[in-house]
């Protein structure tokens, strides 16, 4: 891809399709359009190699930031990296101004429709809208009727998909009025591209996005019914499985809101609260990314509990504001599209400045006939947006499928809308084969300002996967572009990354940790440490396999294999046979994603745990986690890689994990979040040591020195041992160093010291005179090891068994999980799930 | 005629419930045939929140929230209602059913528009080709809507068996239709779905039926039950009761609680709980003809 650019400026190689539709960069005479010149010449000053180099760096940043999009079509539910094109979509100032007028008018219109339909419903009485599109529409939520939202606004942010037809005319294709996804991706695209092409970005006078987000943030603040000085605003997300979860976490961090899921929130006394470790904190404003009907399982009787039972009542009691107001999904129903023009004339006496792509609702006979008669040039969509379905392109259908579709429409006409198909304009996109035209579609965003609506000068431009493709969809393999709305004048620059409001209360409390985040941080700590333990064991094995390839020469390898499998598969696995093919077993333990407990499996678990607490993990930490997955997660288990390569990967893994530990130790404040992460790590490292020591030393063997050597190496304690004992390998000395030496941070006792400290610092830790169960356990572990007589533990009976050591480790192995359970019980138990009462 | 009604629902849990939020449609509404003289809703343990609002359909709805740990929840509604006799509906002098459907589509008066919303299918009365087929023998061309409804109700009454064990609130209507067994809610939903598939407006009614004890026997306390039937809109004439469970039109013993599009809009009690293990529910309903002033029930729980 990059080689193909050599020797020529990137844009100059672009050839617009002949006789095709409208091209965004090249006019009908094959000349570059005026507003592209600045960008074009700025790019000319970069050699193709420079451009390629910068693009590579930008993609690395994109990956390191973990920008992703969750694909429903992927059976593994994997996150797919976000696809961004290095060529922005340029919008001329005149076009930008015209679009702004049209889109603001459209936003006012949708707002007015919602206000009417959730109020007096004059549009129905006066026959402007057919009653069917409201009464027969599942998105019309009767429970929301008559609730007037705070400040009287229904829509706080909305999105409109805009496309350009062959004659250069802009059209609105559809609206998003309940969860207008994409603004966060637009922001991330902007940050990446403005850093990749700072010269072009500066010279082109690109309008900035920050003002839009500041307006949005100010507006959300103004909604708060209580605590108006410093309201708590949460972003309510359906969770990591949602396709745009990345954006939820990203926006929450950028806007400074707590990222919450339904289970984090509860309604008490008609107020919404966030469940924190040390109690409930009131919530004033909810920026929701949940669809209407999922928001309150009680009121809407939904089977999903992604929402908060009692939320509608809290809204009715005016104790919480929701953006957008509940019920807003009604206005995005495609069945409304044919009527928007008429409603605008009726309400405002204005035609639509930005026309809607001609659309026909099949519930009305005339419109239905139009759709059925010209199915070839129609895109057929579900009339009511509650059911998300793919649009059907009539032109792609066989005669038989067309007949079938016609029958379906006739059987249930009001469920369908036909929208005229128009080829979309094309823009240059960098592909594997160089720069090529692709159809594009822009999602524009508007937010409510004090009295009106404010258009984001930018947006999320998406392009289709292939030049012929009609469906522009990221879900279907397309990609995205940054959208540069150009200005002839210089643009105002300020950043939202500094506080807009001065009265911030100084606080040092680390208490603002939602219980669910605590749970995920605890597991993140466990997975990270479990991974490190496994890497160290595998490294010990690989080193021995490389050095002594023939059988029998490194007898301790078998013991290490047993420890590795015990660690990977859980401590109950007994009498494990020695692996028949040690190399294959190493590869499987390292790279087999489908093997429970393997390294690859644990890495996936780290990724999942980290993704659920993205708002709690620093950017650097996230990068470390992302880089962890690259060398190991990406390896193909079937591919034959040499043991040397495996060793290399494992060595890098150890270093990366050290970076994680370093960041956790040096850069995280010692709040509750850090405590939970640290408890997870302490528990897991203790378990690792228990398993290692037990597997290696419960029986004496004639090759014990080799085993002791391996243990020291795996527990990273070789240096200390050498300094103390030189080359004499003695079981009691090794046990002392790994079990009972508090000065060795990798010893078992150090883990128990650390756990005791952590547990003491948890909230409620000081309350009462009786020891709580988790404190009692932490103390018990510590004193048991403190009181242990190392010389006795190292003694074996006549048959070579170390009874006392085995008994101690067996007890610890059984008791340690109880610490996790006690902590869950105390701090995480209110993460119970809600359910419906059986009806009567 | 005056009636005292009490409707007591008790949930018992095997584990403690820490939070319970509910919506009750347990307060009778007024209608041309019925005047509510007294109403009361009593919840134990004491709810922290007990709010009243009028829902979209004009019913009184209670929202309440119990926030102390509990293993038993009791909701008791007591009302006194005065019923008036009514004229038998003018079944034969109603509009042809096709005209009634057309009238609903065309007429933009507030009353007609309000009626029109009940002409659309819902989750519990979802659109199926079977409903049109089932309607056909009763809805012959040009037949007055009142007569056609009377006929449809008679067929449901004679073809379906009342069997409380056959269905639950979550049994799909099509399953009930195939098994030909169900309870009052099922019969009401079937008739609603059938009428709506023709574009006619009909609403689900929740309420009670006064049951007289067998001659010579004393009335058993708690022997009654919630009842459900439907009302059909005859253009320019209004709404009329049809009770397919008892094959009755405009019965004088129907006491109205609330109406909506289907059961989900007006279920007497729905709730979401946190905790609770498994639970059982007991419902006891009494409808007693009140004699003068002395009929007030002494009520203890």
Image: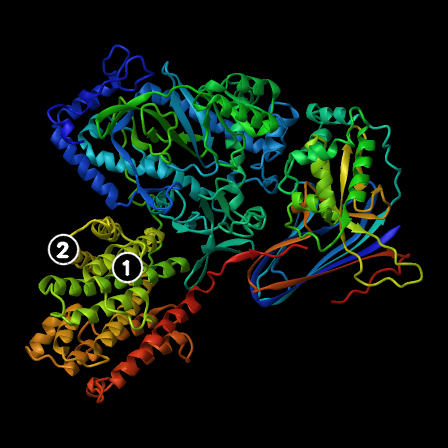
Query: Where is residue A835 shown, x and y percent of the image?
Result: 55, 56
> Which mark, residue A199?
none
Q: Quadrant of the N terminus of chain A?
A: top left
Of callouts 1 and 2, which one flags the residue occurring earlier in the amino acid sequence?
A: 1
> Which mark, residue A648?
2
Query: What colouring style does the render use?
Result: rainbow
Q: Nearer the viewer, residue A780 or B291?
A: A780
- According to the picture, the residue beneath numbered tag 1 turns out to be A598
- Within 10 Å of disc 1 (Cα), the crowding (few <14, some 14-19, many 20+) is many
- In which quarter of the view is residue A15 placed? top left
Task: Tell me: residue A487, above or below residue B148.
Answer: above
As helix, strand or loop, the secondary structure at mark 1 comes to loop
Mark 1 and mark 2 in contact? Answer it, CB < 8 Å: no
Q: Nearer the viewer, residue A279 or B263?
A: B263
Query: Where is residue B165 shown, x and y percent of the image?
Result: 71, 56
Query: Where is residue B78 shown, x and y percent of the image?
Result: 77, 57
Q: Nearer the viewer, residue A179 or A116?
A: A179
Q: Quadrant of the C terminus of chain A?
A: bottom right
A253 relative to B159 in the view: left or right = left
């Amino acid at each position: 891809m990059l080689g193909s650019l050599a020797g020529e400026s990137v844009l100059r190689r672009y050839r617009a399709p002949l006789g095709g539709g409208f091209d965004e960069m090249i006019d009908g005479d094959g000349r570059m359009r005026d507003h592209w010149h600045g960008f074009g010449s700025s790019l000319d000053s970069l050699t193709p190699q420079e451009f390629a180099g910068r693009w590579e760096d930008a993609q690395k940043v994109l990956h390191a930031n973990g920008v992703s999009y969750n694909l429903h079509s992927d059976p593994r539910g994997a996150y797919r990296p976000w696809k961004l094109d290095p060529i922005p979509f340029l919008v001329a100032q005149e076009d930008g101004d015209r679009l702004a007028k049209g889109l603001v008018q459209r936003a006012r219109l949708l707002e007015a429709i919602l206000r009417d339909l959730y109020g007096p419903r004059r549009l129905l009485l006066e026959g402007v809208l057919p009653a069917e599109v409201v009464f027969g529409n599942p998105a019309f939520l009767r429970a929301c009727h008559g609730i007037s939202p705070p400040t009287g606004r229904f829509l706080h942010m909305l999105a409109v998909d805009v496309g350009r037809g062959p004659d250069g005319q802009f059209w609105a294709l559809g609206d998003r009025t309940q969860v207008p996804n994409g603004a966060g991706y637009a922001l991330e695209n902007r940050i990446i591209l403005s850093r990749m092409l700072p010269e072009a970005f500066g010279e082109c006078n690109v309008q900035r996005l920050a003002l839009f987000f500041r307006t949005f943030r100010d507006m959300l603040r103004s909604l708060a019914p209580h605590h108006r000085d410093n309201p708590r605003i949460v972003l309510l997300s359906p969770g990591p499985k949602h396709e745009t979860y990345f954006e939820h976490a990203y926006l929450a961090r950028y806007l400074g809101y707590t990222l919450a899921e339904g289970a984090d929130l509860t309604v008490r006394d008609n107020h919404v609260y966030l469940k924190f470790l040390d109690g409930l904190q009131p919530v004033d404003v909810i920026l929701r990314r949940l669809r209407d009907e999922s928001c309150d399982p009680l009121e809407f009787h939904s089977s999903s509990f992604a929402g908060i039972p009692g939320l509608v009542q809290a809204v009715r009691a005016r104790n919480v504001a929701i953006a957008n107001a509940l019920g807003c999904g009604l206005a995005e129903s495609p069945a409304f599209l044919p009527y928007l023009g008429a409603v605008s004339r009726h309400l405002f006496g204005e035609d639509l400045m930005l026309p809607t792509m001609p659309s026909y609702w099949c519930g009305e006979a005339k419109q239905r006939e139009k759709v059925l008669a010209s199915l070839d040039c129609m895109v057929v969509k579900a009339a009511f947006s509650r059911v998300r379905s793919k649009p059907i392109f009539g032109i792609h259908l066989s005669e038989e499928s067309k007949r079938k579709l016609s029958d379906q429409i006739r059987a249930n006409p009001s469920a369908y809308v036909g929208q005229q198909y128009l080829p979309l304009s094309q823009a240059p996109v960098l592909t594997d084969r160089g720069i090529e035209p692709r159809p594009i579609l822009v999602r524009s965003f508007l937010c409510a300002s004090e009295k009106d609506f404010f258009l984001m000068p930018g947006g999320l431009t998406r392009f289709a996967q292939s030049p012929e493709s009609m469906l522009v969809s990221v879900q279907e393999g397309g990609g995205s572009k940054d959208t540069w709305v150009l200005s002839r004048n210089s643009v105002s620059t300020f950043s939202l990354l500094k506080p807009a409001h001065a009265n911030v209360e100084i606080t040092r409390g680390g208490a603002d940790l939602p219980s669910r985040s605590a749970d995920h941080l605890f597991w993140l700590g466990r997975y990270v440490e479990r991974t490190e333990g496994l890497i160290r064991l595998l490294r010990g094995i690989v080193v021995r396999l490389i050095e002594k390839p023939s059988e029998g020469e490194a007898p301790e390898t078998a013991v290490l294999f047993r420890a590795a499998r015990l660690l990977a598969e859980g401590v109950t696995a007994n009498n494990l046979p020695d692996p028949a093919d040690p190399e294959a077993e190493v590869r499987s333990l390292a790279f087999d994603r489908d093997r429970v407990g393997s390294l690859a499996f644990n890495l996936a678990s780290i990724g999942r745990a980290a993704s659920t607490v993205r708002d709690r993990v620093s950017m650097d930490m996230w990068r470390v986690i992302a880089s962890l997955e690259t060398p190991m997660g990406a390896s193909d288990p079937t591919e034959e890689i040499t043991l040397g390569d495996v060793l290399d990967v494992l060595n890098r893994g150890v270093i990366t994990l050290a970076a994680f530990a370093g960041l956790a130790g040096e850069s995280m404040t010692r709040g509750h979040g850090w405590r939970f992460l640290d408890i997870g790590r302490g528990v897991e490292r203790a378990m690792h040591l228990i398993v290692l020591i037990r597997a290696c030393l419960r029986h004496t063997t004639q090759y014990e020195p080799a085993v002791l050597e391996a243990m020291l190496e795996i527990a990273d304690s070789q240096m200390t041992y050498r300094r103390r004992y030189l080359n004499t390998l003695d079981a009691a000395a090794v046990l002392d160093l790994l079990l009972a030496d508090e000065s060795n941070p990798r010893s078992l006792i150090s883990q128990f010291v650390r756990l005791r400290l952590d547990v003491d610092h948890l909230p409620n830790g000081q309350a009462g005179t009786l020891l709580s169960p988790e404190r009692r356990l932490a103390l018990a572990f510590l004193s048991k090891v403190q009181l242990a007589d190392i010389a006795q533990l190292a003694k074996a009976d006549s048959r070579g068994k170390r009874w006392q050591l085995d008994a101690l480790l067996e007890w610890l192995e059984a008791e340690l999980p109880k610490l996790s359970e006690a902590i869950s019980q105390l701090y995480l138990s209110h993460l119970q799930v809600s359910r419906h009462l059986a009806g009567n | 005629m005056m009636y005292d009604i009490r409707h007591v629902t008790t949930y018992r849990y095997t584990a403690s419930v820490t939070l319970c939020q509910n919506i009750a449609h347990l307060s009778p509404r007024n209608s041309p045939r019925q005047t509510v003289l007294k109403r009361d809703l009593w919840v134990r343990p004491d709810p922290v929140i007990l709010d009243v609002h009028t829902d979209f359909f004009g019913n009184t709805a209670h929202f309440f929230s119990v926030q102390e740990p509990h293993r038993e929840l009791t909701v008791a509604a007591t009302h006194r209602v005065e019923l008036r006799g009514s004229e038998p509906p003018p079944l034969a002098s109603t509009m042809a059913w096709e005209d009634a459907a057309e009238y609903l589509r065309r007429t933009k008066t507030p009353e007609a528009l309000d009626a029109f919303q009940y002409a659309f299918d819902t989750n519990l009365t979802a659109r199926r080709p079977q409903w049109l087929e089932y309607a056909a023998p009763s809805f012959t061309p040009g037949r007055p809507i009142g007569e056609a409804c009377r006929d449809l109700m008679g067929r449901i009454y004679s073809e379906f068996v009342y069997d409380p064990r056959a269905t639950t609130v979550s049994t799909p209507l099509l399953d009930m239709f195939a098994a030909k067994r169900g309870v009052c809610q099922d019969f009401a939903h079937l008739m609603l779905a059938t009428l709506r598939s023709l574009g006619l407006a009909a609403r689900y009614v929740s309420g009670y039926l006064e049951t007289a004890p067998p001659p010579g026997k004393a009335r058993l306390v708690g022997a009654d039950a919630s009842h459900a039937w439907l009302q059909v809109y005859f253009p320019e004439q209004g709404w009329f009761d049809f009770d397919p469970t008892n094959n009755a039109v405009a019965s004088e013993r129907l006491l109205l609680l609330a109406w909506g599009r289907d059961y989900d809009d007006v279920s007497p009690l729905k709730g979401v709980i946190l905790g609770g293990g498994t639970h059982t529910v007991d419902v006891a309903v009494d409808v007693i003809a009140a004699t003068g002033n002395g009929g007030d029930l002494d009520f203890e729980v």
